[in-house]
Amino acid sequence: MAQVEKRGGLLRKSSASKKPLKEKVVLMYDEIFMVVAMSQTEDPSKCSPRFWEELFLMKVNLEYLEGKLESLDGEELMKIKDNINCLFQHCIQALGEEHPIRVVNALQTLCALIRGVHQKNKSTSGFDIINMLMGFDKAELCMKNLMESLDSLLCAEGSESLKSLCLKLLLCLVTVTDNISQNTILEYVMINSIFEAILQILSHPPSRREHGYDAVVLLALLVNYRKYESVNPYIVKLSIVDDEATLNGMGLVIAQALSEYNRQYKDKEEEHQSGFFSALTNMVGSMFIADAHEKISVQTNEAILLALYEAVHLNRNFITVLAQSHPEMGLVTTPVSPAPTTPVTPLGTTPPSSDVISSVELPLDADVQTSNLLITFLKYSSIVMQDTKDEHRLHSGKLCLIILTCIAEDQYANAFLHDDNMNFRVNLHRMPMRHRKKAADKNLPCRPLVCAVLDLMVEFIVTHMMKEFPMDLYIRCIQVVHKLLCYQKKCRVRLHYTWRELWSALINLLKFLMSNETVLLAKHNIFTLALMIVNLFNMFITYGDTFLPTPSSYDELYYEIIRMHQSFDNLYSMVLRLSTNAGQWKEAASKVTHALVNIRAIINHFNPKIESYAAVNHISQLSEEQVLEVVRANYDTLTLKLQDGLDQYERYSEQHKEAAFFKELVRSISTNVRRNLAFHTLSQEVLLKEFSTIS
Amino acid sequence: MGDTVVEPAPLKPTSEPTSGPPGNNGGSLLSVITEGVGELSVIDPEVAQKACQEVLEKVKLLHGGVAVSSRGTPLELVNGDGVDSEIRCLDDPPAQIREEEDEMGAAVASGTAKGARRRRQNNSAKQSWLLRLFESKLFDISMAISYLYNSKEPGVQAYIGNRLFCFRNEDVDFYLPQLLNMYIHMDEDVGDAIKPYIVHRCRQSINFSLQCALLLGAYSSDMHISTQRHSRGTKLRKLILSDELKPAHRKRELPSLSPAPDTGLSPSKRTHQRSKSDATASISLSSNLKRTASNPKVENEDEPVRLAPEREFIKSLMAIGKRLATLPTKEQKTQRLISELSLLNHKLPARVWLPTAGFDHHVVRVPHTQAVVLNSKDKAPYLIYVEVLECENFDTTSVPARIPENRIRSTRSVENLPECGITHEQRAGSFSTVPNYDNDDEAWSVDDIGELQVELPEVHTNSCDNISQFSVDSITSQESKEPVFIAAGDIRRRLSEQLAHTPTAFKRDPEDPSAVALKEPWQEKVRRIREGSPYGHLPNWRLLSVIVKCGDDLRQELLAFQVLKQLQSIWEQERVPLWIKPYKILVISADSGMIEPVVNAVSIHQVKKQSQLSLLDYFLQEHGSYTTEAFLSAQRNFVQSCAGYCLVCYLLQVKDSSPRNLGFETSAFKLTTEFVDVMGGLDGDMFNYYKMLMLQGLIAARKHMDKVVQIVEIMQQGSQLPCFHGSSTIRNLKERFHMSMTEEQLQLLVEQMVDGSMRSITTKLYDGFQYLTNGIM
């Protein structure tokens, strides 16, 4: 894939007229890669002692250099190995030079070398590449020097574009293989850590604005190198960072990238809705949304999402950052110019640079003004999760739910999610659906953040009942709700939430499972999900006194169960049937039968009472109020069984269950990052101009 | 002329009254001195002495003038040579005196000449009485201020300026607005008399410096801009704001700081170093507070002007208020406020303090989520809670180290996570289904269960640990194999009971967020915030609260506060059990300030709105039925505070919460039927008690009218406050004390006033009626 693009780049860039006249630098490259005789190369500096000095003064021709290496096959490459080693070493030497132009050229040459050799070498192992680039004997020292140079360049008070190039080189190095764990060169990056340099970039506002995105992506990738096999120092270090400035910086970078995505999505959406299609859109809205979605690449944001995940998952202190307001985005007070309607960056081609965000003044809408990372993330999730058909989006949606799972397990996060003093109005994206109107944004109440999380979960539940049933996502979704309820029960948080929406969503989901039993059973164990749903109800039934907001909400729960008793009855007969058969679902189904005991008790207890009430009063159809009256009058004769373990859950564990997912995710992120490291981002015309004036 | 005689005398410690002033005051003069010196042990004797010298010098110069003006009086003798001998007695090296003399001479020369010309002739008899008064034990700060204000004699003024050193700091502090207003707006002699004291106190206390600087700014603001720039007030303000008044002898012990509290932060990292330099850079931009805690090194290197961090702190609080005012809805304001404050938190702890507090402290954190926007139409006043660490001395104690917000996580493991305000007993009582039935036997009458296992499932408590698998099997795998049954009715009942037991919290209303915040009992709030704070474990942790007002002129409020305070102490002195609780006011500028709210107070307006009850019903709801102890004492408190409040309203003619119309309104005060209902109706004993209290209060206030009027009168100088519009403010105020009436007549008056106010039942309940609190009820 990369090759195709490169050729494209070549065709675009170099015009035919240029060809015959070879640049000096190209001649020099030729000299390096020239096989003199008998498969031997010659040190070019033999003939001209100032060869290397001159080389790094020359503007790098990335296309040529990379193309040249690419054109050689493995054996040919082996022949010029010594000179490649030599070039590599000189590059590293040049990094220490005072003159920035040499440094720039050396950095670019290194990029080209690494990429060129790797492309050639796809089939072979990583060790061969180390040998090819540096030579086994010198590799350790070589990489040490390289990393140290990069580290000092990144930390020095130098040019920002130089730093940017350093990060690009590192990203280039990290993503050069599809599977990051097979990239053996990274062993040296593990030994010679640049973690501190990354942190410094993030903690220092100006550098964070310039390089935050690259730094965060780099960090996220490095953390995923041989995550489960060895001790990755980046994991260890990231988990203990407690410097607030750094963590906040990281949170900001993530928040900016996510909100940039949200903004672009919103713009696109509005574009579609404001057109004369608007009438149509309402009817076939999902089609158009999908269309809009197509144009907005989710891919670049997977890297950022991964970074968010790693930060939340690994670093306990990062949780506090979630609730921090965005200082830079939130406090924009003067809208300089109306935000451009068309996105500034071509979507999906480059990672959204934070530059763009800071220069585009965000419109003064109340929502933007006081936002925090969690809100931005929830909005992002609401967009991403609405469509899970595409594999990328499925990944993103899954990762969002995993992050939410981690958040829902964290005590501190729960504390601020449920903080009655921190009310927000979160405009979640809602999928336009035929049978419901788009909720007017302005009517949203201002509530504790956990309500937005619950809304998001309810929204997911009601919008994904489809043939391609995302079972995994559903399970995660229910788990998130369950974990939040456990916290509320434990800490006696009485959330004023419209629980009824959750209840009816859950019951509808049960109905869907039953009506698609045969189709779903072919692919999934639907009983796990059913059991979780039933147990959520059990949680409300037996522990409702500890977290429901009002006595009447407890009545409403009963009302809802009684009203929908048909669904529960059906579920019961289904699981009873399957648990009495000696089929593969016997055990799973019987668990559900046990779990249903209280719900059945409620139904069996109240239904006769309601019927007799209707009979006595000669009413054919009882109103809600009448049913509630019967419910209230008959609690005392109802006995429930205390089910154990309702408020317990298994903690999230990445290594045991999610390793494969993350491996796959990181692979796709690597590919994307590599693709985005296009020539033009590496060549940095600006930077050359910058330094030419100095000399 | 005669007055001038008086003033050098007290300073003269020589025992020979040979050249004494008219009258035989020599001995008593001495006694004044000794008394003064005795008290001076509190204040810095050196400084005091310097101030005295200043006065002496001035007098000496005056005498030069006087001699020429051929009004020779014995006083010349006093001074002629007295200075040296006196100073010698004070054990001062003469060399220093000379220096002082030279300095002072030049400075004072011009002023004194003018003063001399203006002097009136007083007879010496009166003067001796004056002197006696000044010497007597009765001579208190109130009189001192009064004479400073009324006397036109520079000598008297200078004497009083000197005497200020002898009063307790707190006593003088009360009159600081008056002193400074005189300094700004009255003639130079008064100013010269006051200045040494102010300068002296500024050197002593950074808080005093701040207050002076703020008041000087605020009370100069009514001047024309061109005069203001060169006014003495502005000059003094500049002097204070510059670092010249930094205590010279008492430099902050740097060594104690430098090994200081880096501990809270991550170990040596480049990132850390870097962020330090960031901090300095941002400070030079002056848009940020200096965070000195993490940064002791920088502080030592280029210590900023000592008031700078505090001024930045105040400035950022005001800036928040300004930004909030631009937002349309209260909800947006609240959100914005919280996020702004969370940013402010990043800069704390710092060498900043809340001037409204009565003790030395450093501000360490603003629990941002607790802040609320208060009810106001166009402005955006807001209430914040501020966590501080009390300290010995603000100046010398080092700023506490920053403890990151997330640090609390390490000290509070998942297991001992606070149960959100539920104590252990409560929790045990209601947590699991079983123990709840212990004292509720009939609830357990479920037929089919014989003996129930009362096994408290401990697993609940640590459900977050990765203990058991989520499974229904766990029922059978538990030790208690027998299933546990519960009654649905009990769950439902517990739910309603628990909701009933939670104290009647106000319902959250996005349009009135402050109601909930104010209703929460203060102790409760303190405990809650302390638990959530990374600094909460420190023994010197304190919680303060303050209302930040931006765009409001609080000078009138300050005046009202002073009057209320004065009345309060008068009533206390006269043992009249009237209860008023004035808000502490900090004037920051002519259009901004802070108010220290009365804790545990909600406005009656909010009470009514939230409870939807009449005031009486609310009392009954909160305190129990008519005959309960709680209700009766609440009722008594209500009567006492209501009477106090009504008197205040009458005397100051308060229309709303501030005396905007001081001196204008002719109606008495507001007494609604609701209030009377709480008092038990018009015929009740309590209502009579109410009227009697009013009478007693008025009689007591009348007795000390001067003390009250004086406060207002002095502030009239140079003021354009609306309460001083028209020339009759002071006269009207005085008239309302009815000095000429007999007590019987006064009683009649009170009856009439109460009657009159009863008739104006339509009077709208005003919003700021927060003197009435349930705090002591």
Image (cartoon, coloured by chain):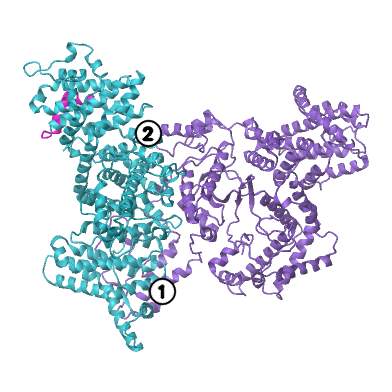
Chain colours: A cyan, B purple
Q: In the rendered structure, the residue with mark 2 lies on which chain? A: A
Q: Secondary structure at mark 1?
A: helix
Write the start and end of the magenta stretch as one range. Answer: A122-142
Dot 2 and dot 1 within a common chain = no
Q: Residues within 10 Å of mark 1 (few under 14, many from 20)?
A: some
Front one among A452 and B772: A452
Task: Answer with the quarter of the image where residue B439 lies.
Answer: bottom left
Residue B575: x %, y % from top left: 75, 60
Q: Amino acid at mark 2?
A: Ser
The vertical placement of B438 against A67, above or below, is below
Residue A131 seen:
no
Give the side of residue B358 with respect to residue B485, left or right: right
Residue A217: x %, y % from top left: 29, 39
Main SS class of the magenta portion in the image:
helix
Q: Secondary structure at mark 2?
A: helix
Front one among B510 and B436: B510
Residue B642: x %, y % from top left: 68, 64
Residue depicted at x 77% and y 25%: B106
Front one among B362 and A353: A353
Picture mark count? 2
Please say if the residues under marks 2 and 1 sit with CB atoms less than 8 Å apart.
Answer: no
Q: Marks 2/1: CA distance? A: 59 Å
Give the side of residue A605 with respect to residue B4, left or right: left
Task: Answer with the quarter of the image where residue B681 lies.
Answer: bottom right
Q: Specify the label residue B493 is tagged with.
A: 1
Asked whether residue A579 is drawn in magenta, I would say no
Residue labelled with disc 2: A207
Return the residue found at the far left.
A38
Residue A481: x %, y % from top left: 31, 60
Which mark's residue is nearer the viewer, 2 or 1?
2
